[in-house]
Image: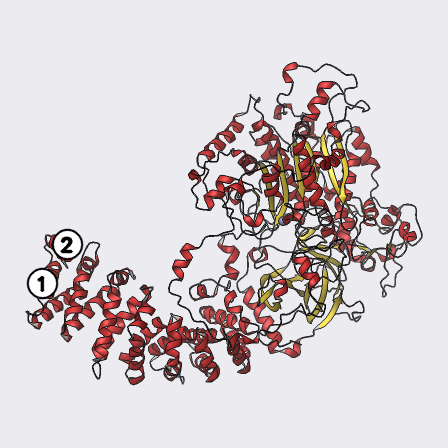
Amino acid sequence: MNKVKTTSEKSLANNSRIVALLTQLEKINSESLLVEADTARYVTSKILHLAQSQEKTRKEMTAKGSTGVEVILSTLENTRDLQTTLNILSILIELVSVGGGRRACILVSKGGTQTLLQLLLGASKDSPPNEELMVQLHSLLAKIGPKDKKFGVKARINGALNISLNLVKQNLQNHRLILPCLQVLRVYSTNSVNAVSLGKNGVVELMFKIIGPFSKKNTGLMKVALDTLAALLKSKTNARRAVDRGYVQVLLTIYVDWHRHDSRHRHMLIRKGILQCIKSVTNIKLGRKAFIDANGMKILYNTSQDCLAVRTLDPLVNTSSLIMRKCFPKNRLPLPTIKSAFHFQLPVIPTSGPVAQLYSLPPEVDDVVDESDDNDDIETETETENENEDDKDQHFKNDDIETDIDKLKPKQELGRPIEELKIYEQFFPELAENFQEYDLVSKEPKPFASATNLGGPIVVPTAGEEHPAEANQSVKGIAVKDLSSLQMEEYNKRPCFLDLPKKDHNKDSLQLQNDQKKLLSSCQCLSQEIVKGLDRITLQNTSKNEQYYSTGCLIKKESKTSLTTPTCNKPCQHVSSCGSGLFEGPSVQLGKLCCTGVDPEEEEDSSSHSSGEQVLLEVPDMLALHDPDLYIEIVKNTKSVPEYSEVAYPDYFGHIPPPFKEPILERPYGVQRTKIAQDIERLIHQNDIIDRVVYDLDNSSCSVPEEGDILKFNSKFESGNLRKVIQIRKNEYDLILNSDINSNHYHQWFYFEVSGMKTGIGYRFNIINCEKSNSQFNYGMQPLMYSVQEALNARPWWSRVGTDICYYKNHFSRSSIAAGGQKGKSYYTITFTVSFPHKDDVCYFAYHYPYTYSTLKMHLQKLESMHNPQQIYFREDVLCETLAGNSCPLVTITAMPESNYYEHVCQFRNRPYVFLSARVHPGETNASWVMKGTLEYLMSSSPAAQSLRESYIFKIVPMLNPDGVINGNHRCSLSGEDLNRQWQNPNPDLHPTIYHAKGLLQYMATIKHLPLVYCDYHGHSRKKNVFMYGCSIKETMWHTNVSAASCDVIEDLGYRALPKILSQTAPAFCMSSCSFVVEKSKESTARVVVWREIGVQRSYTMESTLCGCDQGKYKGLQIGTRELEEMGAKFCVGLLRLKRLTSPLEHNLPSSLLDIENELIESSCKVTSPTTYVLDEDEPRFLEEVDYSAESNDEQDVESVDNAGDYEPSIQEDALSDSEATRTHLP
Ligand SMILES: [Zn+2]
């Protein structure tokens, strides 16, 4: 009290009326026994009057430093006069009524809750309690309760729960009294212990007395009762009670009544309140069952269909949709097992890990669905206090980031003895070669031009030095290669099926319509029948008969094809004749479209570049490396587990980027709820569902009836992975992807063929067993389609297609065996609708631009055959064989020494290494396209590429996981494991490519030829742009809240240089998405192991988006192979700049490069700049709000539904964890 006195005395100087009154009141408090009650009444009524009439007074009383609230509260504690008490309660209500909750918080902080609860307890002892007092008290408690985290506990300890409850029970007709009481009950009920306790005393039944039956009287009261009920029903015990009393049915009936009578939508909040109650009660399995039994699905489906037209009713539609999704009976994925349809016998079975688990599972166990967990409603509920959840959140710290500084510090450990690493010497012949036998540019050994150049800077040609003729040669903005005579020769003799023999025997089959719409005079379409015939380019089954190997390809005859499709069954010396045989008939001219070079804009860009090394980016024409005949030949040596004998047409024929831009799609309003409604119709209108299996890997006898209306599916070719297709409705199909081999999950990548289509029909495809919780398909990404008819019409490209694209959690339950032990998980659906451009076409769909292992082999062979051996040192070695017996290529690229003179050879051997790898994850085909761009750039004849070759020796493993790629896996190798988690301890028998790639790096470390840069190319499914992950101790420590200053590590900032350069030179690259944090979950990835164990400071993962860019030159566009290849080329250019930065002898730096350096130095001063925190491999939990809204949690729905459009949040995972509802099988 003393303290109060002194401070209020101080403020007396203000001389304000309210301060005088408060001082007077304070005096009364201290002399309470002596003063007449009248005085206190008088003073408080004066204060009330001021508080009611003047905001100034309310402000003054609650201002910082004011003791007004304390004085008032202490009066409240001391007084025994009813009128004074009422006055004070009124004053407090005035104070907290405005001010946005801040004033309520002040009241709480001054101990108001306790004072009011004590008062409530005292007042309840009167019989009957004073009504006015109770109304005021409850009104005030309802206002301050939500601001007091301990309110629920305090209320219970003070015995307030039953006081309020009994008031309601005894005064049901007195709405003025029970309204504030209900409001307080709602606040009590947010504490689950309170909710249970109130439930035992009959509160649920009580609420139903208030809310039903339907009446438009007292809607205010009804609204509060519904909110209170929804809060109470979040307790499982109360929900069970409600179900037992049949209240689910009652709620539905009331809802329908309101739906019918509220025709002008004036009572939306009441309708929403009823839905909230249903939503709470259906959190338990019994509730969902009761909902289904009461025909809830149909009721909510029909009512929400009625509401669709009125936008303001969206909250009702969205909440209904949430409830229906939650209650939708979980379905079993229609498969015999979720293990891959193919099996590969491993040489060794690992003793632990996912494969060990898979193998140890008894064969009789049903792995598609979980064992029943029906007991969720029987177990006794453990209601726990939840008031401190906010505190918990504050202490939440992600423990995935490495905090052990000793673990973080790079330490070179060889792991394998030097003698053993000797086997890798064979992969480095360049270090021993003396080039005496070679035909080099300078044949005569001559002295080195200038001694000062020894080991000095590599002179990079600048724009001025660029051959002027080159620019002139460019046609359509494409830099024509300065071909060496040798290359030219190669170009000329390149067998090209595009110049097809002009035979006439198929003239009849020419499509007449094409004559009308000739795009190019030489471009004519093959007949549809022929296209039908082309459906499958089949290799004879290689496993069955080796002797047919040489017979090459044949075309499967379609049973209904009346025309003789050109086939080639006779054994032929060279397969190529077969390949061109396919295209006998009109010639298909692709030449004019084969331009994948840099567009004019790009050229402008690079010429306006003020940077030192002027680089005319040269992305060679894509088909230059494509050779169908060679492809077929290579495919025959590619070993797949299913022993594929067919070749997908796009891989055979090749493709070029479309000549138009493909913008990232705007998502139309309401897609998700429309799709979900259609899924719900499967349950409601079961008779409309066809449910016919039209493709099934598990059942070879599955045959499709030859009906005109059914699409045909196929994916029995390299990288294909379709397992089963079910026709759902006439033009709708559910597709199931195969699991990675020796695994029971990992599916997201898809690649399949469709035929038998009609035009003018929107076909809906649903891939129903996706696993990732979100996808760029929700943010504007489209799947890819390749039409054979279009290809034959000189438009051979993969294009982004599909409308009504949506990615959402579906009703197919996911076994805990495949979900890391978590029960109650669901799969996700990617749905898209496509209208085909041609009737009876053959079309292919893919998750991203396919890039098969055979394609890589073909590209490498073409690169080798086209290079100038005088200029380029190129080697392709076999690093090792994969589990399936495919070779894993290792490529070495550098410049030939100018002569075999000692200095030249010496310079050659002393070039620093750059080690690159890609495609450890098969589903990330974009990584291969980036790698293709890198390889082509490195092999190109531009002066910059030559400087680059003269600067470095490139060691490249372009495909770390050939088996995974071949077999259509999404993430794993044949060992069923993610190879990018095996770098710490790769097993030579199970992970040979990783074991030997690491071996190479270890060998390089022992011979002191540590690479300057290591980079592993990946693809990213949930982020836009291209970016890098690197490794930094300081930035990691910064993220763990350990002050970076407190760790005395001195760190070279060199790791930031390359990404920084790329962000300035590569249009798709985005620096702000880069991260340099080392996470525990990534400790066995290539990036971290090469950094920590091998000691490469610049060790990176480079991630390319599957979707598109939201910054830079490609902002708003989906990414294509052209942009990906450009990224690969720009990466090389970046290395050239890095070379200049890291070369200490370099002087003459152009100013722009110095800027980069300065910036790097600057960034060293503020190294604690935050970088994106990375959570799971490639898929950081990115805070971009757009990325997670589709999966936001339940509680946000209250606020967000009203404004979130149709990004309705789905059911909270927690709520679902008890959701193994009775498995009703849909037809
Ligand atoms: Zn990856």
Q: Secondary structure at mark 2?
A: helix
Q: Earlier in the sequence, mark 1 or mark 2?
A: 2
Disc 1 to disc 2: CB gap under 8 Å: no
Q: Position of residue 1190 (x, y in %)?
A: 52, 61
Q: Secondary structure at mark 1?
A: helix
| Location of mark 2 (residue) | 7
The image quarter in which residue 645 lies: bottom right
Colour convention of the picture: secondary structure
Q: Position of residue 1 (x, y in %)?
A: 15, 59
| Location of mark 1 (residue) | 27
Q: Is residue 619 visible?
A: no
Q: Is residue 515 visible?
A: yes
Q: Give the camera-side residue of 869 and 1057.
A: 1057
Q: Give the camera-side residue of 987 and 427.
A: 987
Question: Amino acid type of disc 2?
Answer: Thr
Q: Give the camera-side residue of 56 and 337.
A: 337
